[in-house]
């Protein structure tokens, strides 16, 4: 069982927080009968401020949301959750905090065994995949491992960005960074989906749909040893579960 | 003791490998009486190819360079080295490989105790600092710790890049990423020097000079709890040793 909504970004330029995806967020929780959501704020430092921002946005969607950091029994809160939203920020901080609080396995089991809906954005989307090896974030803290929830057997690179051919900058392009991952000798680095801002994945059990708010947008798929390939919004990417 | 040459980048746009810094590289090794350099290639996957590229560049500088990966006694090679060059690539891969091969402490001791000159570029510059928490690279592998050589008690962000105000991209700017590092509650995250491409540090014992090949360039200093500050090329940054 697997009910996932995975956004590349929380906000588009000049937009309000989560506004561009409001319809899909409302539909995702409505069709799963969820009206009250547990928020995971650990990708940011200031949990109170983060909760306020997200709570306000969800209220406008007609949804109640409460951050887990205010609970005095984290495990009970996870066990009773109807749905989760894991917000963006720093992916290393998010993963390390979930390990430190012993929440990783608990949330994982709720989503995979009990079919509890999981929405992620940016760092929260990274966490839904096999590991955080393809985050864009800085390693400001050191998690015990890079392994994440593994709801999906591949990687996502959120905020995927094309190389700007006019740039004079010589730091690696996103494409080069991802090829470094796939070029590790004798490794089995899984495929990586480069998910551009404005796109998201809707996952229901064994079906993965690529969706987006920007017309003609594509997502770029990196597979070890193969040429990269663009997939258009509205494509069925379920084949990624069998690679 | 400390003799360091730390470059932000190995190459400038349209340039040959290390070409923009050739004079300073020649001077650095000459004034320390070094004619034969041990190359550390572990930031890249293909050590043979990497050695060839670097060897050719150093030959043009009149310097002999051999990669440590061809040695059948790594520890002896470190112990006999006249000088080191640690090249760029993926910082996580570089650090993990040095830990895996038990080379981190050995090289550190040669540089700090024996005063052996150390040149780093990009990832090799990250490694010279207290840790790799401010690398721009993806965590394609998981080192046992993020602690690095610690020749300097602060962090460097190589390839430092200003935010492009015309960009529609919503992923964090470099500035935001560095503030995430300094905003960790109850931590002692050290200062971070944002070293732009074309700049480098020359370190001799307790003197740190900011140098560069581009006129009027500055480096940006991030200090926890303070406003960022720009320092011009040719500034003396020795105060960073006492912060
Ligand atoms: Ca982030
Ligand atoms: Ca790099």
Image (spheres, coloured by chain):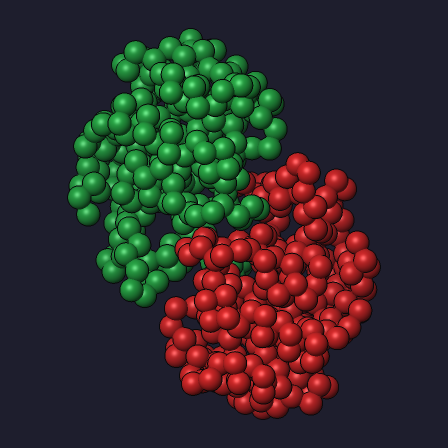
Chain colours: A green, B red
In which quadrant is the N terminus of chain B drawn?
Answer: bottom right
Which sits in the foreground, A235 or A51? A51
Residue displayed at 77% across by 73% down: B205
Say if residue B169 shows up in the picture: no
Q: Taking A200 as reference, is A148 above or below it?
A: below
Task: Name the spot of residue A162 as percent of width and height, x first.
Answer: 40, 48
> Is residue B144 left or right of B160 when viewed as pictured?
left
Which sits in the foreground, B239 or A67? A67
> Is residue B158 left or right of B57 when viewed as pictured?
right
Residue displayed at 30% across by 36% down: A151
Which sits in the foreground, A212 or B68? B68
Write down the quadrant of residue A182 in the picture: bottom left
Q: Taking B114 as reference, is B232 above or below it?
A: above
Say if residue B238 shows up in the picture: yes
Write down the quadrant of residue A3 in the picture: top left
In which quadrant is the C terminus of chain B drawn?
Answer: bottom right
Which sits in the foreground, B5 or B84? B84
Task: Give the tally of numbered discs.
Answer: 0
Task: Name the spot of residue B5 as percent of width and height, x first.
Answer: 67, 73
Residue displayed at 23% across by 33% down: A208
Task: Name the spot of residue A21 as percent of width and height, x first.
Answer: 39, 23
Q: Taking A28 as reference, is A225 above or below it?
A: below
Q: Taking B87 as reference, is B33 above or below it?
A: below
Task: Name the spot of residue B101 as percent of width and height, x first.
Answer: 47, 71
């Amino acid at each position: 069982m697997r009910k996932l909504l995975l956004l590349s970004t929380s906000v588009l330029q000049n937009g309000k927080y989560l506004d561009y995806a409001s319809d899909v967020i409302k539909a995702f929780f409505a069709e799963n009968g969820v009206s009250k959501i547990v928020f995971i704020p650990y990708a940011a430092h200031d949990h109170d401020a983060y909760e306020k921002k997200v709570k306000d946005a969800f209220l406008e969607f007609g949804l109640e949301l409460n951050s887990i950091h205010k609970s005095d029994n984290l495990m009970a809160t996870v066990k009773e959750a109807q749905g989760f939203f894991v917000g963006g920020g720093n992916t290393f901080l998010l993963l390390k905090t979930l390990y430190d609080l012993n929440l990783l396995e608990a949330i994982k089991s709720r989503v995979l065994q009990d079919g509890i809906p999981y929405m992620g954005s940016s760092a929260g989307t990274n966490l839904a995949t096999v590991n955080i090896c393809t985050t864009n974030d800085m390693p400001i803290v050191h998690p015990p491992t890079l392994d994440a929830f593994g709801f999906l057997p591949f990687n996502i690179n959120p905020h995927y960005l094309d190389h700007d051919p006019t740039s004079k900058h010589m730091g690696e392009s996103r494409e080069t960074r991802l090829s470094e991952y796939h070029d590790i000798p004798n490794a089995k680095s899984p495929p990586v989906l480069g998910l551009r801002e404005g796109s998201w994945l809707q996952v229901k059990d064994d079906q993965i749909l690529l969706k987006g708010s920007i017309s003609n947008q594509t997502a770029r798929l990196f597979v070890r040893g193969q040429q990269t390939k663009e997939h258009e919004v509205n494509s069925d990417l379920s084949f990624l579960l069998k690679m």
